[in-house]
Image (cartoon, grey):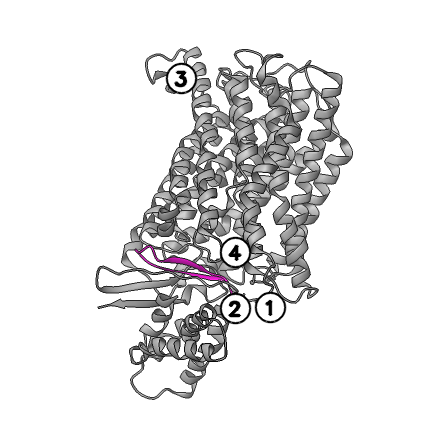
């Protein structure tokens, strides 16, 4: 899940750190409502995926240096809807040429850790059919 | 054709009207095969980055076509064939007629189910692929149509069970004829295995898509799917095995080496096919690793009867090859009747199945599975099992079965032989491409020609997939020319097999001793149910109450 969240944000380097902050804040907030630790931790992990819809936003919009045009904003704003669709839907992802490979199933929390031994750019792919735009859903994991 | 066949019309004769229903049941299967291969070609070319989807009038998207390909070729083709073939084998082995009413009922349900599924898929109301994973939501006609196809297989089974039971009443103390035994065991296994998918499609997904239950539990329906979903591959395979065990030895001029050996193999399939489904869910969260590991081990168990089959069939083939004058260690292979299209197709099917089985070992291994799960490795694997071992055997059987059922001679047998060779070369190139690119992480189920990402390491594999897929398409197209011309223009009269080519065994089955217990069908079904309960019980006990949380999604 961390890989997926990072993948979504990796295109957008300014906010790469943002995922970790959202996780910690959400976990603390959830804990303060009286949730048990395990559940609060799940909320934190899930919160990391709030921008996962950016996987559908083309790089040329996401990484555009200047201000976006109205048409581009229209696409950018859809990332929340795409995110909801991805999370409401059964998906799956892999990072090519690693053992990172997991199904994402609504109602289930999956955890997976992987140590990248080689620096480089890794391709993160949605590998379970999730609707018409399935073949446009990918991201990058950058290991420095 | 050079292979010795049973041409004695004085023997068993199936009523003409029963032959007609069986013929049409099997035609449904071959029509489904034909319908599915066009998009199969589009998929293979898409992996080579060649997009021919624009040439498909009426098709609204790649995944609609992918759904049609999977359903038509993997499900409708295989089960329509089995619905006709297995009851026919049971009737022949017991020397009886089938129940006419059940034959028609099974055929009617199959056609009705097909019409509903075609309505849903052609109208783009069910582009959910053949796995139909919730929360992707299809039109109700899709789930009900698929369930009706399953029910048609149950009716076909009932026809076999009743026919066999009547035979046994008249033959107290006799062993069940081997051909009837293995045919009945094939569908007995499937009857048990298909209950979870029927429950899921009719009991959960249909009320959900109709709005009667608002939300669905995706992991529960997934697990029910795979509960059936691994055994389904044996339901595809076993009719092919029936031909390999009980027909091919005669077609090559040999005999089956051991009656008991054949029975034990099918018994193992009955016991072990079902408690193995979780190995399709190794990467699913929410299923305990222990349960996955237990079923992983059982999956290796199911490889035993397949390896046993390899030895048994090989011995029968060698006997035939040597009887035809073959000498030396391998010289008998050349002396097999390769010019008989039915034999050639099935021998080549067996060869590709060696690779299909070997790649299956990788899928069943918990850790290696993480590398290949949902990559093109998987379709690379299953096109060498269901896509060649099964498909080519079912095509090979057609070369004698269609003449038998229609009373017409096979049209241009040499073209049939060529079809099998072209298909085999195609599948080997295709699978080499899919498997190698899969190891580099090329995902399956993507419209690669239009994907927004790629990896240079996938290019060679993608091109091989395209070349191989094109050859496979040409091979099957030739098969259809031969079969269609046989049905329409084949000569009547001499040279038409009057009987099915069923084999003798070296020694008849004994009527005393331990192996008579192999015929106690009810006992073995009970043992199978206990094994299934042990393998799946703990999962369901720990899993409930179910989590009905997903409202569903139609993204196509």
Give the residue pinned by disc 4.
Answer: B65
Residue A88's label in the rendered image is 2
Q: Are marks 4 and 2 in contact (CB under 8 Å)?
A: no
Instruction: Check if mark 4 and mark 2 are on a common chain.
Output: no
Q: Which secondary structure, mark 1? A: loop
Front-lying residue, B224 or A28: A28
Instruction: Check if mark 4 and mark 3 are on a common chain.
Output: yes
Gap between marks 4 and 1 measured at Cα? 25 Å
Crowdedness of circle 3 by 10 Å Cα count: few (<14), some, many (20+)? some
Q: Identify the residue at horizontal 57%, vertical 46% (top origin).
A: B537
Gap between marks 2 and 1 measured at Cα? 8 Å
Gap between marks 2 and 3 measured at Cα? 60 Å
Front-lying residue, B248 or B338: B248
Q: Are marks 2 and 1 in contact (CB under 8 Å)?
A: yes
3 or 1: tag closer to the N-terminus? 3
4 or 1: tag closer to the N-terminus? 4
Q: Is residue B358 magenta?
A: no
Asked where in the image residue B267 lies, by quadrant, the reply is top right
Visible residue check, residue B370: yes
Give the magenta range. Answer: A88-105
Left or right for A86, reference B426 = right
Give the residue pinned by disc 1.
Answer: B551
Left or right for A95, reference B553 = left
Give the residue pinned by disc 3.
Answer: B335
Left or right for B155, reference B276 = right
Gap between marks 4 and 2 measured at Cα? 24 Å
Residue mark closest to the camera, 4 vs 2: 2
Gap between marks 4 and 3 measured at Cα? 43 Å
Residue mark closest to the camera, 3 vs 1: 1
Crowdedness of circle 2 by 10 Å Cα count: few (<14), some, many (20+)? many
């Amino acid at each position: 899940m961390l890989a997926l969240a990072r993948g979504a944000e990796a295109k957008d380097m300014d906010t790469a750190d943002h995922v970790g902050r959202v996780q910690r804040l959400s976990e603390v907030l959830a804990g303060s409502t009286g949730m048990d630790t395990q559940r609060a931790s799940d909320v934190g992990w899930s919160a990391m995926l709030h921008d996962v819809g950016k996987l559908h936003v083309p790089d040329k919009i996401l990484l555009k240096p200047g201000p976006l045009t109205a048409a581009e904003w229209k696409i950018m704003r859809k990332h929340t809807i795409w995110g909801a669709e991805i999370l409401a839907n059964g998906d799956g992802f892999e990072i090519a040429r690693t053992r990172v490979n997991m199904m994402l199933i609504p109602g289930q929390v999956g955890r997976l850790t992987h140590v990248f031994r080689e620096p480089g750019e890794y391709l993160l792919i949605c590998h379970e059919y999730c609707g018409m735009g399935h073949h446009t859903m990918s991201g990058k994991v950058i290991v420095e | 054709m050079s292979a010795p066949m049973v041409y004695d019309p004085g023997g068993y004769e199936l009523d003409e009207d029963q032959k007609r229903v069986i013929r049409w049941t099997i035609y449904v299967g071959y029509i489904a095969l034909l319908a599915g291969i066009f998009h199969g070609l589009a998929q293979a070319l898409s992996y080579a980055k060649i997009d021919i989807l624009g040439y498909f009038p009426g098709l609204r998207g790649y995944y609609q076509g992918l759904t049609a390909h999977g359903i038509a070729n993997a499900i409708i083709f295989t089960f329509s064939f089995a619905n006709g073939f297995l009851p026919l084998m049971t009737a022949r082995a017991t020397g009886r007629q089938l129940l006419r009413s059940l034959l028609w009922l099974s055929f009617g349900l199959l056609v009705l189910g097909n019409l509903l599924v075609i309505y849903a898929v052609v109208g783009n109301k069910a582009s959910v692929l053949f796995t139909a994973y919730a929360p992707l939501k299809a039109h109700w006609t899709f789930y009900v149509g698929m369930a009706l196809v399953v029910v048609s297989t149950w009716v076909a089974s009932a026809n076999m069970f009743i026919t066999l039971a009547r035979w046994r009443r008249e033959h107290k103390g006799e062993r069940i004829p081997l051909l009837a035994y293995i045919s009945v065991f094939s569908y007995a296994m499937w009857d048990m295995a298909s209950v979870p998918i029927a429950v899921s499609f009719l009991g959960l997904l249909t009320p959900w898509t109709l709005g009667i239950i608002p939300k669905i539990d995706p992991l529960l329906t997934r697990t029910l799917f795979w509960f059936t979903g691994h055994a389904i591959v044996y339901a595809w395979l076993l009719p092919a095995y029936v031909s390999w065990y009980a027909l091919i030895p005669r077609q090559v001029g040999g005999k089956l080496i051991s009656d008991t050996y054949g029975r034990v193999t099918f018994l193992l399939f009955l016991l072990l096919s079902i408690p193995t489904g979780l190995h399709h869910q190794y990467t699913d969260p929410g299923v305990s690793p222990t349960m996955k590991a237990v079923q992983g081990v059982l999956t290796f168990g199911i490889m035993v009867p397949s390896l046993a089959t390899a030895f048994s069939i090989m011995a029968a083939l060698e006997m035939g090859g040597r009887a035809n004058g073959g000498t030396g260690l391998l010289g008998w292979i050349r002396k097999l009747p390769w010019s008989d299209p039915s034999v050639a197709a099935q021998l080549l099917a067996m060869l590709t199945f060696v690779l299909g089985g070997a790649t299956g070992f990788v899928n069943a291994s918990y850790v290696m599975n993480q590398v290949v799960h949902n990559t093109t490795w998987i379709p690379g694997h299953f096109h060498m099992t269901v896509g060649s071992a099964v498909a080519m055997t079912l095509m090979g059987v057609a070369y004698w079965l269609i003449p038998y059922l229609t009373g017409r001679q096979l049209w241009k047998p040499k073209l049939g032989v060529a079809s099998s060779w072209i298909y085999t070369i195609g599948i080997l190139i295709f699978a080499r491409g899919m498997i190698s690119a899969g190891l580099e992480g090329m995902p399956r189920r993507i419209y690669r020609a239009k994907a927004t990402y790629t990896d240079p390491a996938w290019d060679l594999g993608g091109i091989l997939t395209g070349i191989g897929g094109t050859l496979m398409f040409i091979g099957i197209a030739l098969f259809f020319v031969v079969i269609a011309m046989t049905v329409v223009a084949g000569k009547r009269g001499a040279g038409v097999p009057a009987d099915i080519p069923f084999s003798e065994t070296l020694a008849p089955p004994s009527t005393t001793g331990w192996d008579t217990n192999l015929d106690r069908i009810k006992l073995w079904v009970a043992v199978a149910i206990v094994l299934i309960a042990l393998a799946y019980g703990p999962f369901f006990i720990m899993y409930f109450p179910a989590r009905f949380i997903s409202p569903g999604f139609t993204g196509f």
